[in-house]
Structure formats: structure tokens, C-alpha cells
Image: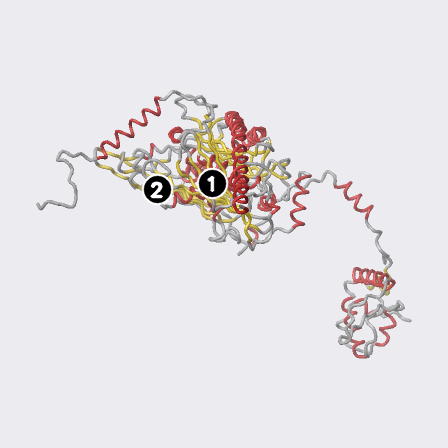
Amino acid sequence: MPLDHRRLCGPEESQPPSLWAALAAEDEDEEGAGAAPRDPCSLRPLFARAGLLSQAQGSAYVELGSGTKVLCAAWGPREAAEPGPGRLLCEFRRAPFAGRGARGRPGGLAEREAEREAAAALREALEPAVRLGRYPRARLAVSALLLQDGGSALAAAVSAAALALADAGVEMYDLAVGCALCRPPAATAAAWMLQPAEPEERRAAARLTLALLPALNQVSAVLGGGQGGPPEDWAQALRLGLDGCHRQYPVLRQSLLRAAQRRDAAAAAAAAASVA
Amino acid sequence: MKATPLSNCERRFLLRAIQERKRLDGRQCYDYRNIRVSFGADRGCCIVELGKTRVLAQVSCELVSPKPNRPTEGVLFFNLELSPMAAPGLEPGRQSELLVSLNRLLERCLRDSKCIDTESLCVVAGEKVWQIRLDMHLLNHDGNITDAASIAGIVALCHFRRPDVSVQGEEVTVYTPEERDPVPLSIHHMPICVTFAFFHQGTYLLVDPSEREERVMDGLLVIAMNKHREICTIQSSGVVMLVQDQILRCSKITAVKVAEITELIQKALENDHKARKEGGKFGFAESIPNQRITAFKMESAAVDTNNVEEQAGEIIAKADPPSEVFANPILHTPGTAQIGEGIENSWGDLEESEKEEAAEEEGESEAAAFECQKTETEDTNMMKETKEDEPILLSDSEEEEVVILEPQEVPRKTRSEVWCCVPALAMENLVVVCSALPRN
């Protein structure tokens, strides 16, 4: 057989890489299961920054300690033909590299449906917070991009979208803060956990996401499902989630303030430069 | 087609009625509409009617290869379809958001709650598993699609029988229904969705909103629960305050409703099972009434008659006194009487022939004597009043000749004078009263 000079041949004793891939996955699972059980009420560290995209009117980036990264951009009121109060259009996209492992079917129906449901949930969560009555016949657009899914993706997207809208200067009643919880399968301890990581979410028996307007203490969206539990259990989970939202609120407000200060400083510098 | 928008007065009326705890169809706040479950001839086919909302559900199964990451579990596929048959506003292009949200809610309710045991659907691990497909179609939209669809879905799944399968080593034999009886799916529990609609910023709460109520509601809360009082799914939209209290309150109501609905479903399944076993007739032909004109009738609605007397008294007290009543019939001959007297035609001067024709027409219409005359007298009263006002200038234009017909103060001559001018015309058209011409 003629030698193929264009390709580098591997050594004779080669083994297919899929063997090693399976081993690596097992290692990971064991690690996850063997890790010390974390405090269910602890919030992971949250990083939020507003005002980072130059082209969009408002933008925000939220990163959770478990690795979830969401980037969100918002555009202020644009003329629309429909009469009546303004409309909020939300879009949620998962980046192709967002999840671990193979993507089911890229661009397939299941993915599109999941994205549409997430977009609808985003809209539900944000609509009560935005003063749509002040923008008649206008359209406000919000677009969220999930860069990495480390659990609680929708909750992070809600917070990012609210920040982006506020950064764009849209009038709002309050910031919407999102929080996710999950309950591990009944074999292990069945307590609800705040802000699950991705492996925990995958194995969870029940999941709950909620969005809260903290200053007004109004819940704008609740989305929960999974294997059943008594209502008191769910009520307790809600209380935990609301508490988590309240605790995240100061961080988001701080990021907005900093973004405003940065913008002022940049404007002052630009004005000084143009004068001089 | 676009759905007809709701008028402002309808919206106000609905909200006011809800404030007074009244619903359009007379239900209480926490009452469901009538639920009817009917089964088709095939196993796994059923129609659920929640009031007028109708959903058709059909379950089918197929042997497929399993998903690669779950080699020992069967595959479930749920699909709800909306079509313009259900409501004119549900065109294929316009309903995507509603469709996606309904589909996801039903998926979460039926799939994530693990009500169906997917491990039992495995035939050969890693190679052949059963794929159970549930298709639902909305036949009529009268509000609360979620509840109807969830009931239809779970009933169809309970009703369905899949072919029996036996595995011997490498051989897999699928038996036809004639060889071996089909086997039911193994269902752990029956999750049923209950929808709550909130009005007036969450103050008022209604269970099972109808289509009109859905259009004016502020927010929505859907709780899926099974009869063991376990919440499987919860979803809320719109702004809800004090969410924990609402959830606990709603879950108590949900538990009661779900128990009732589960009982109804069990009874329906039992009846159908009995009918099939005894060889009786079953299928839609039996359970859906014949499509005669009388088939669709309004169900009797309970009307609250507690305050009827007081309300009637109030209305009568506030109403205007009735106008002059002609109560004395004039008896001309036995069998012939005249109630009231006519007034002369006040349209102005007509020619002789027209007068005769007018007289004939007046004669015919005198058959419906009393009310017409009463309205005529009322009209003249009203016209007299308007005449006292300033004359209304219709237009300044000199091109049009606008003639305002002022109602003249026509002396109320009785019909008898007019009749005297009538020559001997054919009297068949004239009614009995006219035949007795009063003598002057």
C-alpha cells in the first residue's frame, strides 16, 4: 500500500480516543458525587457588569460562580406600527459551545422550542418591571446569549436582561432578579438547593426558577416542574428562592451604579479632549 | 383571521361582575365547568369537553431505537396542535407563543413528573424500546386549554393498550391484539393541571377561566397536582404578590378539584372498560350525541334569585310611570270590540289616492292595535317636547334643500272621520275592527 505522505501517521499501537473519553466522563461523575455536600442556602459568587457593548444601547454580563455566563443586550424604544402600549420582544440563544458534550441536533426543533420557551419566560419575568405605558407604539428588544451553561441559566439571563434594559435607559419600576433552585433525587437528602450547578441540575428531581422585583416585593414569574412534592415543600422552596433574590439585589444595583459612573467619566474625558 | 378584540364595555362589565363575585355563566369562584370524557373505538383515543372547550387526544406506539444516553428508557413524545377550527385567531402564523408555552407546560406536567414509567417501555436494552406518542388537537377554544389538554392527555394514556412483547434470548416477538391481549402502560400517578386566573392585581381569584375571563385577566397560575396532593408543576405569569400564601391557598383548592376530577376520570374509564368487556357498544358514535339541531343546547345555569324582589322593587320605583293606558274597549257588536282610537296620519298632506292607500295600510296594521298606538302616542309626546327646543340647523348649504318636518299639532281626529272618505273598496284586507264603522 503506497505510503500517504500528506498525513502524519500515528504510532502503530494506536487506540481510538473514544476509550479515553468514556473514562474521563466517569471520572467527572465520581468527582461530582463524591464532593462534599454544599450548604443549600449558600449563594455562589456573582459577577455582574453593565455597559460593556458599544453598539447596543444597553448591555450586561452576568457570571455565576458555577460557570454560567450570560451576555445580554437591549435596545431602547423603536418605532412600531402597532397601536397600543409598547411591546417587549425577548430573544434567548444558546451558544453552540454552551453545553458540555454533544449537542443533540444543532438547530433542531427541540433546541428551537427550548429557546422559544426561555424567551417567553424572560418576557414574562421582565414585563411587569418595565413601564411599557411610557412607550406607546414602541418596541423594546432584549437579546440574551448564553455563553456557558453551568446551571441556573434562565435565572442568570433574567438578571442580565433587567440590567441591560436599565443600562439602556428604559424606564423601569424595578430590576428583576432571577434565582433558581433544585431538589436532588429522593435517594440523597431531599432539601432544596439554591443556584444548582450543572451536574446537580441534570440529576435533579425537581427544578424551580423565579423572578422577583425586590424593591416592590412582587414576584413576576414562577416556573417549576419535576417529580411531585407536597405544597408546603414548594412554598418553602419559594421562600428560599425569594431570599436568594433579595441577597443578589445589592450586587446588581452596584454594577449599575458603576456603569453610570464609568459612562460619566468617559463623557467628561471626551468633552475635555474635544475642548482641548 | 384576527381574533375580534374585546370591547371596552365588555371588559368593564366582566371586571365589575368579578368584583361582585359573579361570573358570566353563573358559576361560583371555585367551580369547574362540566367535564365530559368520551372514548373512541380505538384504544387510546378520547375527547374531553370542559364546558365548551374540546380537546381530542390520541396515543400511539412504535418500536424504535432508544436515545444514546438513555439506553434502557422508552421515548415519550407529546404534541398539542391548535388550528383555526378551534378559534379564528389561531392561525398557523400567529399562535407560536401560545403554542410553545402550552406544549412546554404539558411536557413538564407529563414528562418531568415521571408519571409514566419509561423503564417498563424497554424491550431490548440499547436496541428496541417503545416510543409512546401523544397527539392532542384542540377542537374548540372556550378558555382554559391547559386543563382540558392535561385531562385529555392523562386519560388517553390510561386508556391506551400497547401490544404485548416477549423476548427470548435474541428473538423479540410482538404479538398482535388477537394473539394476546394488549398491555396497559404503567402509570404511577395522574397529574392534572388546574388554572387560576387573577384579577384586580391579585385580589380576586377564579378557577377555570372561560375565554372571556381569560382576555381580561391580570395573571395566571397553573398548578399540576395528583391525587396524593403532590405538586408536579407550577407556573405563574403576570404579577403576583405574596406568592407563598397564594400558593398554599391555591394548592388547597387544587387538591379538592383534582380529587373530584380524578374520580370522574376513573369512573369514565371503568364504564368504558365494562362496555368493552360485555360486548356493548362503545366509541364516539355512542357517546357523542347525534348532530341534530337540538344537540347543542345551553345547559341550565343557576341564577341567583335571592335579591330578585328587592331589585325588582327598586327598578319599578325608579322607572317612569307608564303612559296613558287605554283600558276601555268599546263594544260595537257581540264579538267585535275596539280598543283605543286611531289618530290621523301626521305625515302631512297626501293626495286622495295616497290617502286611500294609507288608510288601507293603517287598517291592516291596526291588528296589532294596542302597543302600536301606545308607541305612537309616546312618539307624539316626544315630538312635542323637541319642538319646544331650538330648531336644529342641519346644514347651511344652499344646494341641499333640507326640509325639517315639524310635527304639526294635528288634532286628534279619530279614525271614523277618515273612514268616511273611503269609497267602497275591497274590504277583505281590513281586519275585524275596521268592519264596524262607528256611526258619526
Q: Which residue is mark 1?
A: A52
**Residue sitting farthest toward the right:** B440
User: What is the crowding at mark 1: few (fewer than 14 residues within 10 Å), some, or many (at least 20)?
Assistant: some
At horizontal 57% and vertical 46% (from top left) the residue drawn is B211
Residue A265, given in percent of the width and then of the height, sits at 53, 39
Position of residue B159 in the picture relative to residue B298 (left or right): left
Residue B304, given in percent of the width and then of the height, sits at 69, 40
User: What is the crowding at mark 2: few (fewer than 14 residues within 10 Å), some, or many (at least 20)?
Assistant: some
Quadrant assignment, res B120: top left
Looking at the picture, tell me which residue is in the foreground, B300 or B257. B257
Position of residue B177 in the picture relative to residue B32 (left or right): left
Q: Residue B281: in sight, yes or no?
A: no
Q: Element at badge 2?
A: strand
Q: Amino acid at mark 2?
A: Cys
Q: Which residue is mark 2?
A: B61
**Residue sitting farthest toward the front:** A276
Position of residue B270 in the picture relative to residue B60 (left or right): right
Q: CA distance from mark 1 to mark 2?
A: 52 Å
Taking A193 as reference, is B424 above or below it?
below
Looking at the picture, tell me which residue is in the foreground, B78 or B52. B78
